[in-house]
């Protein structure tokens, strides 16, 4: 589980990703946010991934960065659709409902208003600084070099 952020700007991060990873990012962000909302008691759901490093980072010791994580999800989904990607009406509704629940949690004062800080974890490497953005770029270039299918995104190798 990863959040591939190559920039603090969500639009730049979304446009950087290849089609396959972009679609997967929407689903992973959806799962991460749901785990946090379940732990806070706003929805019923599975919290077993709460110990995963990226989920712990987003959960932020009980003051989750869900507002910004949700904005990232929306930007990635927007880019996915811009490229011709599809979503079921059911999933679209779930994303919209998630936003409503996040707004409720925000009104209750349980969420952080801060932007999601940079975070990179891969293997033994863990970074909590702007250097994380560069490391994700490097990781994506590495993965694209190993992929059998061309990345089909807005970045040239």
Image (cartoon, rainbow, N blue to C red):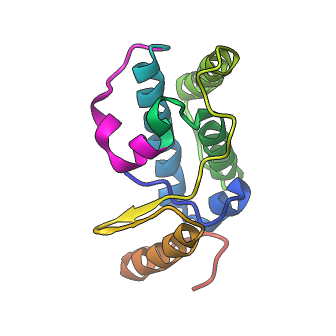
Task: In the rendered view, tell whether residue 116 sits above or below residue 19.
Answer: above
The span picked out in magenta is 43-57
The residue lying at 62 percent from left, 37 percent from top is: 70
Q: Is residue 42 above or below residue 3?
A: above
In the rendered structure, the answer to whether residue 31 lies left or right of residue 82 reads: left
Vertical placement of 69 versus 13: above or below? above
Residue sitting nearer the eye, 123 or 78: 123
Return the x and y of residue 7 as percentages of the image width and height: 65, 64
The residue at 46%/50% (across/down) is 24
Q: Is residue 59 left or right of 95 when viewed as pictured?
A: left
For the point 32% across and 45% down, the residue is: 52
Q: Position of residue 109 (x, y in %)?
A: 65, 19
Q: Is residue 16 left or right of residue 52?
A: right
Residue 109 as seen in the image, left or right of residue 57: right
Residue 50, given in percent of the width and then of the height, sits at 34, 35
Does the magenta run of residues contain 50? Answer: yes
């Amino acid at each position: 589980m990863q959040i591939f952020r190559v920039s603090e700007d969500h639009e730049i991060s979304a446009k950087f990703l290849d089609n396959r990873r972009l679609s997967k990012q929407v689903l992973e962000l959806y799962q991460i946010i749901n785990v946090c909302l379940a732990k806070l008691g706003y929805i019923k759901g599975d919290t077993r991934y709460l110990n995963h490093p990226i989920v712990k980072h987003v959960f932020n010791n009980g003051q989750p960065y869900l507002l910004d994580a949700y904005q990232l999800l929306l930007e990635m989904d927007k880019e996915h659709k811009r490229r011709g990607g599809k979503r079921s009406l059911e999933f679209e509704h779930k994303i919209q409902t998630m936003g409503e629940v996040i707004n409720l949690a925000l009104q209750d004062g349980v969420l952080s208003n801060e932007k999601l800080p940079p975070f990179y974890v891969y293997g033994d490497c863990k970074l909590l600084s702007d250097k994380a953005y560069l490391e994700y770029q490097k990781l994506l270039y590495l993965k694209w070099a190993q992929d059998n299918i061309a990345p089909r995104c807005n970045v040239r190798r």
